Image (cartoon, rainbow, N blue to C red):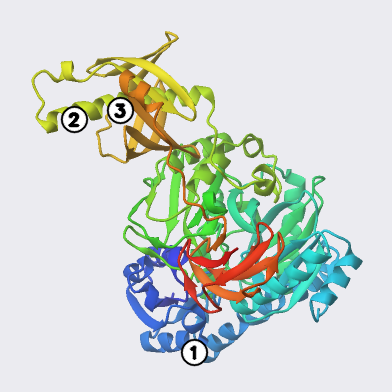
Amino acid sequence: MFKKILIANRGEIACRIIKSARKMGIGTVAIYSDADRDALHVKMADEAILIGPPPASQSYIVIDKVVDAIRQTSAEAVHPGYGFLSENKLFAEALEKEGVAFIGPPAAAIEAMGDKITSKILAGEAGVSTVPGHTGLIEDADAAVKISNKIGYPVMIKASAGGGGKGMRIATNDHEAYEGFRSSKNEAAGSFGDDRIFIEKFVTQPRHIEIQVLGDKHGNTIYLNERECSIQRRNQKVVEEAPSPFLDPETRKAMGAQAVALAKAVDYCSAGTVEFIVDSDRNFYFLEMNTRLQVEHPVTELITGVDLVEQMIRIANNEKLELTQDDIGINGWAIENRLYAEDPYRNFMPSTGRLTRYRPPAEVAEDSHAVRNDTGVCEGGEISMYYDPMIAKLCTWAPTRHEAIRVMRYALDSFELEGIGHNLPLLSALMDHPKFISGDMTTAFIAEEFPDGFNGVELPAVTVRNIAAAAAAMYRVAEIRRTRVSGRMGNHERKVGSEWVVSLQGETFPVTIDADKDGSDVIFADGTSHRVESDWLPGQPLASMNVNGELMVLKVGKISAGFAIRYRGADLAVRVRSPRNAELAVHMLEKMPPDTSRMLLCPMPGLIVSIEVAEGDNVQEGQVLCTVEAMKMENILRAEKAGTVSKINVGPGDSLAVDEVIMEFE
């Protein structure tokens, strides 16, 4: 077995690989850029080598620099993780020349399957069902429009070397095809150094289901069931689960057989994933093959008990698979939620900055349930604009899907994250969404269910009352603490009143609190009583509350006369006032936000790629004004209404902070 491996990656996947290597008794080498000097993967590895400036194009994907790090540390093998150089055949070939093992498939398989055009042709030859489309060279945007018309809208425009949703656009008309081709080509060139684009028919009402395969160098290939990855935003997966709630055993077996056939056709060895689009009738079509470890591999590990990273290392060491197809079953259900540094309240714009608080839920591995958090950050760490916005992958397992969802809800409620915008509220909302709970979903789920973006959740009436009762009991405890600290002692029971008015989510509840040593009975005006028990103390950011026998984990922050509470996708300003203060509060004027209607603000920290207008130009609603790149994705900013550009404050190449003024209008 290898004594030392180098991990040619960063973030959570580098940390994940280090864990398996350590379990196997293998030493690890991390590489890092200037931006990652204090990163978690650097701290976890046995050795670490600096390889360059923050941009990946000057550090993590420079083959010569990675090879030099290998030479410095005498690493015997390299695990590429996913992204970066993981599907770069030149990197695999460079390692072969160095006599260093590549913990991944052969260069020929990477070349064949890493290129979406070639892989689609090979899949057809191997008897794998494929989607109709155009796989030839597309010269320019005008040609893309003609091809799209020939295929028939809607079409999917894709980067041949793409992955992770980058270089991918859906077009429903000529205008979208023209712009989508240009944006996909630019993203592909920037992310992969390969700007080739192909176009295929977009399958309506599709589900995204993929098959995990594993093959050794001795001709043995198996599949490890499927993962459902239909909950996506902008073609980027958000929630994954294994198995799929949609597949039946016959379809699973057929998809697995085709995935294995494709892997064998290219002499594939290592872990890989064959992705399919599945329609409402369970017809499935080959989408692409990822010749690497997938981001969502933990859910497969949780239902099969197979450590995929360990298997990849053993296969690279020329060992035979000890597993056969008959060894692979389905034990329970696993769900993964991707936690991103994206603000759902700002149209999911990337967010950067320091993690002032980062406390994931405790990891658990029991017979009844499991919680796993794959992460590459720690409290005090920096989320950089240079890399992917993923913070963590929170996974849960339980014997049934219903139980796995329940465990996930509590895990999300217990996740403390402050300092940056993040998608925890969205993830919580998804876990409670009736269509997700029923398993009725397509890749358009988020676009269809949140057509105007994510603006939080309206909690049901019974939940609102439970939170009102909890907040009243908490406020009473906080008032007692404030009374003691201020020195207004005497008998504090006479100082703290029992009547309060709780306001949240547009509703007001007068309540009376009858407290005892074990908790409080919170009595509403209609006579209903809620029993609240908790050991919460003022200042604690999480409150585990038992309300009428139901466990609720509330994220708690301070605001004037109450609490900022986050629960199940809802961000609530909960005010708790005395009856007299509640009467007076009605007359308080609401502070209005400043008028920015005549300004184009940068929606996220990013780099100005291009400015498409000039001062004095008249612009129309929907017209492209500029393009901002953030976390390897291009974002086109358009005019919200007609107007005249009066001032442009920035130019291409400028780095901007969130809400910095790009241009102004008359």
Alpha carbon distance from label 1 to label 3: 59 Å
Q: Is residue 179 above or below residue 367?
A: below
For disc 2, the marked residue is 481
Q: Is residue 359 visible?
A: yes
Which residue does the numbered mark 1 point to in the structure image?
64
Q: Name the foreground residue: 480 vs 7.
A: 480
Report the residue at 49% width, 78% height from top.
56
Q: CA distance from mark 3 to mark 2?
A: 11 Å
Q: Could you tell which of marks 1 and 3 lies nearer the N-terminus? A: 1
| Residue type indicated by callout 3 | Met
Of the two numbered discs 3 and 2 on the same chain, state the one appearing first in sequence: 3
Identify which amino acid the numbered label 2 is placed on: Arg
Q: Image quadrant for the N terminus?
A: bottom left
SS class of the residue under badge 3?
A: helix
Which element is circle 1 on?
helix
Amino acid, disc 1: Asp
In the rendered view, tell whether residue 451 sits above or below residue 148: above
Q: Nearer the viewer, residue 471 or 35?
A: 471
What residue would you read off at disc 3? 474
